[in-house]
Structures are given as C-alpha cells and as structure tokens.
Image: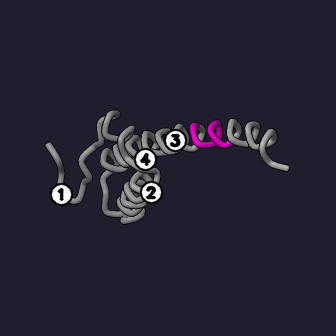
Amino acid sequence: MEEKGRLPEPEQAELDSCSIEELFERLNQVIGGLEDGSSSLEDSFRYYEEGMRLVKACSGKIDRVEKQILVLDEMGGEYGA
C-alpha cells in the first residue's frame, strides 16, 4: 500500500531502463521526502532504502560509461595524432 506523499518504489528493471538524468531526478525527490521532516521513522527508512538503490543504479551507469570512455581513449591513441 502506497502512503500519501510516498513515491512508488522502483523495480530493478525499471531502474536499469532509466537514464542517469531520470535517476538523479528521482533521487532528488527521495531527498526532498527525507528533508521534509514530516515522515515517520519507517517512511524515512524506506526513503533511505530507495535512495541507496538509486545511488547504486547511478553508480553502475557511471561505471559503464567510464569503461566505454577508456575503450574509446585507447582506440583514439591509434587514430588521434
């Protein structure tokens, strides 16, 4: 059951299909819910859990892009000069 003001919790597949910008927007909403100050301890913990899932998803996407950049960088050494 979803409580008033709470965001629906995303499934992992949904997180994987979101862009980094969408994940950051959702993370900002979660942070806003935590900073609101009117959440119960249980709701705050749920916000925290969701926020950590979002941070993990963002980190995974950033790691993948960094790896792609490294590959392109290595290839660029052959074509770059």
Q: Amino acid at mark 2?
A: Glu
Q: Is residue 19 magenta?
A: no
Tell me the element at label 1.
Answer: loop
Q: Is residue 20 above or below residue 56?
A: below
Q: CA distance from mark 3 to mark 1?
A: 31 Å
Q: Which residue is mark 4?
A: 51
Name the quarter where the N terminus is drawn: top left
N-terminal label among 3 and 4:
4
Tell me the element at label 4.
Answer: helix
Q: Which residue is mark 3?
A: 61
Who's the residue at 39% across and 38% down the image?
A: 16
Closer to the eye: label 2 or 4: 2
Q: Which residue is mark 2?
A: 21
Magenta stretch?
Answer: 64-69
**Callout 2: few (<14), some (14-19), or many (20+) C-alpha neighbours within 10 Å?**
few
**Nearest the eye: 64 or 34:** 64
| The label number, if any, that marks residue 4 in the structure image | 1
Is there CB contact under 8 Å for labels 3 and 2? no
Closer to the eye: label 3 or 4: 3
Q: Amino acid at mark 1?
A: Lys
